């Protein structure tokens, strides 16, 4: 396993939409990550990281996540990031045949880590951890076309 890059993202905590962009070169090519955040809608029942000890309102949640490898888009459906709030760190871990986009968010009791595993420019799983324990895992299966 090779840590491709680790960059602290400016916390997306001010009121209004925020934007963050990270770029780096790895052995699997160049990667570009763009995040856009928006204030938490009060109608949402549950958003990861939105309800910490401070109960601050509004939390900022990811409204757009654009990921590119070698200039080509890596599609990530909105349902895999729209419930993530107050992201404060992001990095990519490069492994044998895949990479993992890692996002840390929340604070104190609402802290969480999301791992989006990507293989061949396709999202293959999303894992959410809190206090080191897996609390949610989604595995995507793609049909083999011959």
Image: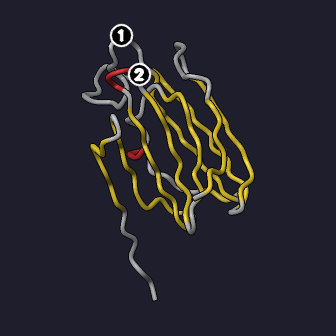
Label 2: how many Cα within 10 Å (few below 14, some 14–19, many 20+): some
Reply above or below: 12 against 27: above
| Quadrant holding the N terminus | bottom right
Residue at 36% across, 23% down: 50
In the figure, is residue 57 to the left or right of 135? right
Q: Earlier in the sequence, mark 2 or mark 1?
A: 1
Give how far across and how far down residue 83 sits, in percent. 37, 35
Reply above or below: 87 against 118: above
Q: Secondary structure at mark 2?
A: loop
As rendered, which of 97 and 38 lies closer to the eye?
A: 97
Which of the 4 image quadrants contains residue 59?
A: top left
- Callout 2 touching callout 1 (CB < 8 Å): yes
Give how far across and how far down residue 6 sits, in percent. 63, 40
The residue under label 1 is: 54
Residue at 42% across, 81% down: 144
Label 1: how many Cα within 10 Å (few below 14, some 14–19, many 20+): few
The number of discs equals 2
Reply above or below: 134 against 86: below
Q: Which mark is residue 107?
A: 2
Which of the 4 image quadrants contains residue 8?
A: top right
């Amino acid at each position: 396993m090779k840590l491709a890059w680790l960059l602290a993202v400016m916390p997306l905590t001010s009121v209004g939409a925020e934007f963050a962009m990270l770029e780096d070169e790895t052995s699997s090519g160049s990667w570009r990550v763009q995040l856009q955040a928006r204030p938490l809608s009060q109608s949402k029942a549950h958003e990861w990281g939105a309800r910490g000890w401070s109960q601050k309102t509004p939390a900022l949640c990811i409204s757009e996540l654009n990921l590119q490898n070698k200039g080509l888009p890596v599609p990530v459906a909105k349902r895999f990031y729209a419930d993530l709030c107050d992201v404060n760190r992001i990095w990519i871990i490069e492994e044998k045949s895949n990479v993992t986009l890692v996002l840390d968010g929340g604070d104190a009791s609402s802290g969480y880590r999301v791992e989006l595993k990507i293989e061949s420019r396709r999202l293959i799983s999303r894992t959410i951890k809190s206090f080191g324990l897996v609390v949610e895992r989604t595995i995507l299966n793609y049909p083999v076309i011959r």
